[in-house]
Image (spheres, helix red, strand yellow):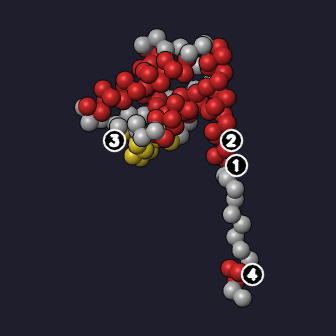
Amino acid sequence: MTPDEMFPTPKPKRDLAEELKLKGMTDALNHANGVNPGWGAGAEAFYRRHVNVRMKSGENTTTEEVRELAYAAGIPVPPDCRAWGHIAKALIKDGSLWRVGTSVHRNPAAHKGLGNLLQKP
């Protein structure tokens, strides 16, 4: 019997951290829609328009950048900014955006954490 057979590595059903991240984004989106009905649809429409225009110039974008422009354009600030993460994840999942790298957040509250660098395919 090999060591791998004697001591098999357990396969996790799903990463708990990933599940909690997704739950946090979903809860944030639901809260934003509860406070401001239709917030998610309006924010997603803004995000899609922004990406389509930016990618024509060959530039990448980040959710942080989209958020700043959305607020300047009058999109309300959600109670929890993780709602934007839910929207970005949906655009990535449906193929509207690709993750092409990482970017350091400019927002001081993010403590120079990393975010996704996104690009329209």
CB-based contact (under 8 Å), mark 4 and mark 3: no
Disc 1 to disc 3, C-alpha distance: 30 Å
92 sits left or right of 35 in the view: left
User: Counting residues from the N terminus, which is met first, the one under dot 4 or under dot 1?
Assistant: 4
Name which residue lies at 71% across and 74% down: 8
25 sits to left or right of 67: right
Quarter occupied by residue 2: bottom right
Closer to us: 50 or 117: 50
Quadrant (top left/top right/bottom left/bottom right) for the N terminus: bottom right
Say whether marks 2 and 4 touch (CB < 8 Å): no
Q: Is residue 74 above or below residue 49?
A: above
Amino acid bearing label 4: Met
Tell me the element at label 1: helix
Q: Which residue is mark 1?
A: 16
Q: Which residue is mark 4?
A: 6
User: In the displayed image of the protein, which residue is found farthest to the right?
Assistant: 6
| Residue drawn at point x = 61 percent, y = 25 percent | 29
Q: Is residue 8 left or right of residue 100?
A: right
Separation of disc 3 and disc 2 at Cα? 28 Å
User: Counting residues from the N terminus, which is met first, the one under dot 1 or under dot 3?
Assistant: 1
Q: Position of residue 57 (x, y in %)?
A: 24, 31
Circles 2 and 1 in contact, beta carbons < 8 Å: yes
**Could you say which disc has been placed on residue 20 in the image?**
2
The residue that label 3 is drawn on is 121
